[in-house]
Image (spheres, grey):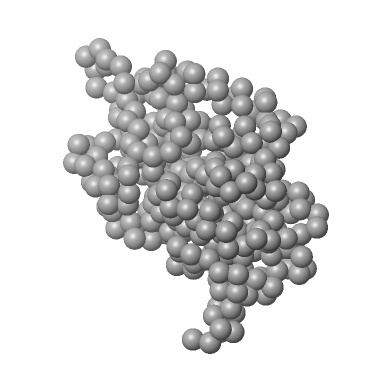
Amino acid sequence: MSRLFFALTLASCVIAGCNRGAQRDRSDSLGSEIASGDKKFVVLGTMTDQFDRAKAKANAEDVITRHADLAGTVGLFEYNPPLILEALERMGKLGQVKVMGFDENPATLKGIKEGTVVATVVQNPYQYGYESVRILNELHKGNKSVIPENKFIDIPARVIDKSNVDAFAKETSDRLSKKDAADSKQASQGKKRPSFAFITNGIVDFWEHAKAGANAAGKDLDVDVVVIMPSNLTDQTRKVEDLLTRGIDGIAISAIDPKNQTDVINKAAEQTNVISHDSDAPQTKRLLYIGMDNYRAGLMCGKALRDAMPNGGKVMIFIGRLDQDNAERRCRGFVPAFVGRAPRTHE
């Protein structure tokens, strides 16, 4: 393969929105000028880590070492920004390279307060948990009116920066402090209550907020809730199959690899009510999706970092994996917003 062909291929993958398989475990600066909008704002590529924290940190260190002129980074999964900060600090470049975050990891919020993180785009995982249980309960009662025509319940993302970080940190802390008190696993006092499963796509702090919301809904609605945090794709699939065997009354799932989980999700949908949250599985028979518009969130992320870099520069994208629907959409939004290409207003 010629060097020019490789450069063109790489740039095409980056601009298309970090399609699955593109730069899965490495990145390269070839073609970066092609990936640039106005020649000042450049996306070098995408590095994934498959939820391996050691690899995520090593990826950041590798990029910092190989690109002395690196001007910015963006971590599109909750744990990426804190590991980028650790890498920058270890290599003596903390504060010299812009860091754009995603989600509300305490280290990311601390970085915003201290000026080492530009901002972070946050979801509302607490509401994901609460709404998922509420909707499953309504569906269990036969109320199909809770399904919107577009099968999407939008819980909008927002940007957290120095102007609102303190208020936001208190908000999230208050919710987490109620997590144990909201635990819905309580004695049913002789009656069988509906039981619902809230399944995450991994084990990260982000999901503790969703767990608090799901358990709070369980307590408010007098239903049983089990929150399952699988370690990988195989584990998630196995957990779904086990729930079906046990006769669960409804499942809310953030699919790890929706295209390769179509069969298991459709099988679940034939036996119980299935909805998706956080990361959608649009090609399956799930009844609806609860979450934010990840494409719009990517746009917000790209614009915030671009605004913080008036002189432009080179940035690298870090993310857990690209198989998830939310990851692909975030990349699709981030790239045009950062490099200055006219983005679509929606996906």
Q: Residue extending furthest bottom?
A: 2
Q: Residue at x 32, y 44 (%)?
A: 231
In the depicted view, which residue is nearer to us: 220 or 95?
Answer: 95
Q: Confirm whether residue 271 shows in the render.
A: no
Q: What percent of the width, then of the height, locates residue 100?
A: 64, 47
Q: Residue at x 56, y 69 (%)?
A: 28
Judged left or right of residue 108, residue 255 is left
Number of numbered labels in the structure image: 0
Q: Residue extending furthest top?
A: 189
Q: Residue at x 58, y 78 (%)?
A: 7
Q: Residue extending furthest left?
A: 245
Tell me the quarter of the picture where residue 341 sits: bottom right
Q: What percent of the width, then of the height, locates residue 188?
A: 27, 16
Q: Residue at x 62, y 32 (%)?
A: 110
Above or below residue 179? Residue 336 is below
Tell me the quarter of the picture where residue 334 sits: bottom right
Q: Confirm whether residue 315 shows in the render.
A: yes
Quadrant, the C terminus: bottom right
Q: Residue extending furthest right?
A: 310
Above or below residue 80? Residue 133 is above
Q: What percent of the width, then of the height, locates residue 75?
A: 57, 49
Judged left or right of residue 105, residue 114 is right
Above or below residue 257? Residue 199 is above
